[in-house]
Amino acid sequence: MSGHIYGINGPVVTVKDAPELAMMDMVNVGELALIGEVVGVEGDTATVQVYEDTSGLTAGEKVVGQGAPMSITLGPGLLDDIFDGIARPLKVVEAESGPFIGRGLAIPTLDPKRLWDTQILVHEGDILQPGDCYAQCQETPLILHRCLVPAGLSGTVSRVRPDGACTVEDVLMELTDERGRTYPLKLSQRWPIRTPRPIAERLPIHRPLITGQRIIDTLFPIGKGGAAAIPGPFGAGKTMTQHQLAKWSDADIIVYLGCGERGNEMTQALEEFSELLDPKSQQPLMCRTILIANTSNMPVAAREASVYTGMTIAEYYRDMGYHVALMADSTSRWAEALREISGRLEEMPAEEGFPAYLASRLAEFYERAGYVRTLEGREGSVTVIGAVSPQGGDFSEPVTQNTKRYVRTFWGLDRALAYGRHFPSINWLTSYSEYIADLKPWYDAHVSPKFMEDRQRIFTLLQEESQLLEIVKLIGADVLPEDQKLTLETARLIRVGFLQQNAYNAIDTYVPLEKQFRMMEVILALYDGSKALLARSIPLSQLRATGIFDRLCKIKYEVPNDSLDRFQGYEQDVAEALRQVDEANR
Ligand SMILES: Nc1ncnc2c1ncn2[C@@H]1O[C@H](COP(=O)(O)OP(=O)(O)OP(=O)(O)O)[C@@H](O)[C@H]1O
Ligand SMILES: [Mg+2]
């Protein structure tokens, strides 16, 4: 299964005399055995996209097919580490070849020498089906790694190894199928990255991914198993938002994919996540995190593959019964990789030079998100959150528009808000979540039956504010009736005291749902009480003079997450301010 290089155009290589190469086959290109994948076949000519730098490659060098689609190794040791777009461990690559990724380095994804204290869960004679768990080991203090029989394989356990220390390459047991063929099963397994891993069934989305970010959890929540996009212009806070979600969201596992962005951001992520502790378990965040870095200085074809590598790893842990969140920063850089390769393949360009299959690639990616019943019968999910960086912040460009078709949560970042240092700069007028109805029963049961009602009132006040501000622009605020002034004052409190959230403040960076709810309750109690007073022709200025609106703006910094009893103080302050104004007008 080999041929010869005939033409080279950047990452795209034409191979002659290769009648046996099939579409999607993984190949080794040239003397350095660079890793590539067949993306086109015509007669005995194949087109290969190469995941490594092709400089120095010459015509005539040999190309060898591996007879299998582009696959990665899955197993313990993925967590708490950083990989490139085709799952090579970057720390090992760097140790062997320095900071510039060496080429043709056949470095295994998982350390072949590392020993894992493994428990075998099956006995000779057991009959196993796809998805059955045959062994487990504690991968990190947070995550039990469970080895499942791969899809398409079933049979009788014919040989088992005793419990104890094993490498990812040791055979743990053998499975013999009906026809007498035996298959060795290990701690690790291979999976083709472009093939979604099978599940038993999709389940409805019914519980939120809790992020601790108020504007997300309260106004525009995402369900576990859902898909969201964060489009935003340069510097609006896409990466920061993704980092906040990676740090604080209540997923069991985070796969963080740095796709075509600056390399120092990934270094920063690695450093920060190693230092921070998971709020639930007090273990380092990296114990539940996998980083995949294909930064702007790395080969463009590997960037194309990196999203599938990330997704396959996410699905692998989902199948063990975990809730996984996959962050991709940025899907625009991925789309640009598609465009570049498509151009080299001389395909007919569609909108803005992107290939005609941009939409279907985006759809395939986001459709791999979902809340599922696994083959084993457990529940697991993959939530996908993709940053989009449209040029000039223009949301009408093809990547943003096509992404919008496949995600149900849209957190649109806004240049003006970011410029005014309103962070997160998620614009509450253009953003949306289509999961509200799906998630309401969960919020009713786990936070308060009033949560979604309060949310709706907050949301309505913000919308009314935006309409009133149009009028104010024309005629000024002074002529507005008092109750509309109250709407403006309350909406300001909501924006400053509730929506703005400072990622650098120890108390404010992560806020549990209970605190979010209590904050809404206090704000709405002030609004309702004020409204009753205004109905008696008392001017709003008297209420403002009490300073209560400004006081409530500070709750976010003054009430630590573990001292929510302090809310009583604010509730009393609201009652006291209302009482004062009431008495002064008796
Ligand atoms: N929640 C937040 N709290 C405080 N500051 C924030 C927040 N979000 C963003 N910022 C500020 O905005 C700056 C830019 O954010 P970030 O790097 O995430 O933008 P970006 O959209 O990813 O930019 P690029 O287009 O360059 O990738 C941050 O360095 C930070 O100072
Ligand atoms: Mg960024």
Image (tube, rainbow, N blue to C red):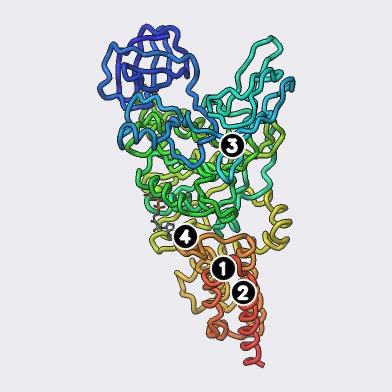
Q: Which comes before the other along the chain, label 4 or label 2?
A: 4
Check disc 3 and report its element: helix, strand or loop.
Answer: helix
Q: Which comes before the other along the chain, label 3 or label 2?
A: 3
Q: Which comes before the other along the chain, label 4 or label 1?
A: 4
Determine which residue is flagged by label 3. 317
The CA distance from mark 2 to mark 1 is 9 Å
Q: Which amino acid does label 1 sit on?
A: Pro
Check disc 1 and report its element: helix, strand or loop.
Answer: loop
Q: What residue type is labelled 4?
A: Ala
The CA distance from mark 4 to mark 1 is 15 Å
Name the front one of labels 3 and 4: 3
Determine which residue is flagged by label 2. 566
Q: Name the foreground residue: 280 vs 157.
A: 157
Q: Name the foreground residue: 462 vs 172.
A: 172
Q: Which comes before the other along the chain, label 3 or label 4?
A: 3
Quadrant holding the C terminus: bottom right
Quarter of the image for residue 533 reads bottom right
Q: Can you give x and y, in whole percent of width and height, for residue 94 in the image?
A: 34, 36
Taking the image as shown, residue 103 lies to the left or right of residue 282, namely: left
Q: Give yes or no for contact between labels 2 and 1 (Cβ–Cβ under 8 Å).
A: yes
Whether residue 322 is visible: yes
Q: Can you give x and y, in whole percent of width and height, for residue 520 in the image?
A: 62, 67
Q: Name the foreground residue: 199 vs 153.
A: 153
Q: Which residue is drawn at 63% across and 28% down?
A: 198
